[in-house]
Amino acid sequence: LVLMLSVQTTWRVGKEAVDAGSALVPDSVPRPIARIGVTFVAVSVALFLLKSVISTALFVLAMMGLIYFAFLAMNPKEGSRSVDEGDSPPSDDPAEEARRIMEKYK
């Protein structure tokens, strides 16, 4: 229901914008041709803006990925969370962790 109202509102606003734009065209141009021309220009501008936004978003996403992989390449210990030799793996049980620490300092 909300999507339908949104589409109807968008259609109405677009139609009013085309009518207002075609009113700016000189009267020597027939009204149907003026409406078609204004619609074509409006759709062209809208698609250009949409393409620009999508292109910018993809560029930012690609740069974030590139920077992340460069960070991992320069800091290999940050990327891998493996346990070093000599350390015991972390346990999920707090009591076991406390026993291990107590054994270490006996």
Image (cartoon, helix red, strand yellow):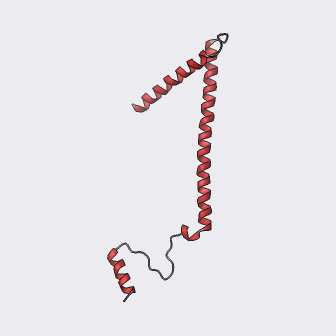
Q: Residue at x 38, y 82 (%)?
A: 101
On the image, the x and y values in percent for residue 33 come to 64, 16
On screen, residue 98 above or below 9: below
Residue 97 against residue 46 in the figure, above or below: below
Q: Residue 51: percent from the left, percent from the top?
A: 62, 38
User: What is the total number of numbered labels drawn onto the structure image?
Assistant: 0
Front residue of 3 and 101: 101
Residue in the image at 59% along x and 42% along y = 54
Residue 92: quarter of image: bottom left
Extreme residue in the right direction: 28
Instruction: From the viewer's side, name the closer residue of 47 and 74.
Output: 74
Q: Residue at x 50, y 70 (%)?
A: 81
Single out the residue that lies furthest toward the left. 95
Q: Residue furthest top?
A: 28
Residue 87, percent from left and from top: 47, 80
Query: As displayed, is residue 30 above or below residue 58?
Result: above
Point out the image quarter for the N terminus: top left
Q: Is residue 21 above or below residue 61?
A: above
- The image quadrant of residue 74 is bottom right
Residue 60 at x, y percent in the picture: 60, 49
Residue extending furthest bottom? 106
Residue at x-position 59% and y-position 40%: 53
- The quarter of the image holding the C terminus is bottom left
